[in-house]
Image: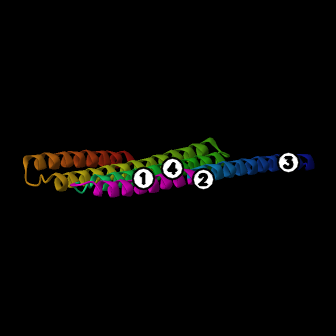
């Protein structure tokens, strides 16, 4: 083999390696930025939850000082709803970070044959879908839990246990549970 051909091949290989290094460094830089922004968003969510709890505590104290004021469990329900919503929001932020990580891994792996690139992209799409469905399932579970809490609080607050109104609220809760389970089953079927 001629020395010139070997030198050209070595130079081409070195150039490919340099491009891959730059691509990897760019992807790492991008991901660090996404992770930092996600961290700030999650901190803001935690601060909002804390602010909501403090406001709820203050309102409960104020309501307790009113003459003849009944105990109001709706404050606790509201706090629970905000906390669950915050959990879903944080799961969504984590999902977006994971999604970016998956796509950046696919971006870094784009060297090679078209078949390898296609397999990498297909794997990335599958991972993104699975993560998305996990977040959706979590949101559905929070919906079912909150619905149960609202129904239970209404029963206790308004003393409707054993009445026709109790049967209606229980029917509503079962309807929500049925919808939630159907959605979860649909997500399970799609992922199979």
Q: Which residue is mark 4?
A: 93
Residue 185, percent from left and from top: 30, 48
Q: Nearer the viewer, residue 142 or 158?
A: 158
Which of the labelled discs sits on residue 35, or is there none? 2
Label 1, on which residue? 52
Q: Is residue 93 visible?
A: yes
| Place of residue 175 in the rendered image (x, y in percent of width and height, measured from the top left) | 20, 45
Whether residue 50 appears in magenta in the rendering, the answer is yes
Give residue 11's mark: 3
Q: In this view, which residue lies farthest toward the right? A: 3
First of labels 3, 2 by sequence position: 3
Sequence-wise, the earlier of marks 3 and 4 is 3
Q: Earlier in the sequence, mark 2 or mark 4?
A: 2
Label 3: how many Cα within 10 Å (few below 14, some 14–19, many 20+): few
Answer with mark 1 or mark 3, whichever residue precedes in sequence: 3
Indicate which label's residue lies in the foreground, 3 or 4: 4
Q: Is residue 122 left or right of residue 169?
A: right
Task: Give the alpha-carbon distance from disc 1 to disc 3, as whole Å.
Answer: 61 Å
The CA span between labels 1 and 4 is 20 Å
Q: Nearer the viewer, mark 3 or mark 2?
A: 2
User: Which residue is depicted at the point 87% across and 45% down?
Assistant: 8
Residue 51, image x, y percentages = 46, 54
Q: How many labels were placed on the picture?
A: 4
Residue extent of the magenta highlight: 39-68
Q: Earlier in the sequence, mark 1 or mark 4?
A: 1
């Amino acid at each position: 083999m001629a020395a010139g051909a070997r030198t050209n091949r070595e130079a081409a290989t070195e150039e490919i390696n340099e491009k891959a290094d730059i691509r990897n460094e760019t992807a790492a830089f991008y991901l660090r930025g996404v992770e930092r922004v996600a961290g700030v968003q999650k901190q803001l969510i935690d601060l909002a939850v804390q602010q909501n709890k403090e406001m709820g505590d203050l309102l409960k104290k104020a309501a307790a000082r009113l003459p003849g004021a009944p105990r109001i469990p709706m404050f606790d329900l509201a706090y629970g709803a905000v906390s669950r919503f915050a959990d879903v929001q944080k799961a969504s932020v984590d999902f977006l970070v994971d999604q970016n990580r998956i796509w950046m891994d696919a971006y870094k792996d784009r060297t090679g044959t078209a078949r390898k690139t296609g397999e990498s992209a297909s794997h990335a799409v599958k991972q993104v879908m699975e993560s998305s469905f996990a977040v959706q399932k979590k949101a559905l579970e929070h919906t079912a839990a909150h619905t149960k809490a609202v129904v239970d609080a209404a029963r206790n607050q308004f003393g409707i246990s054993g009445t026709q109104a109790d049967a209606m609220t229980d029917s509503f809760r079962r309807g929500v549970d049925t919808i939630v389970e159907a959605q979860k089953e649909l997500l399970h079927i799609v992922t199979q």
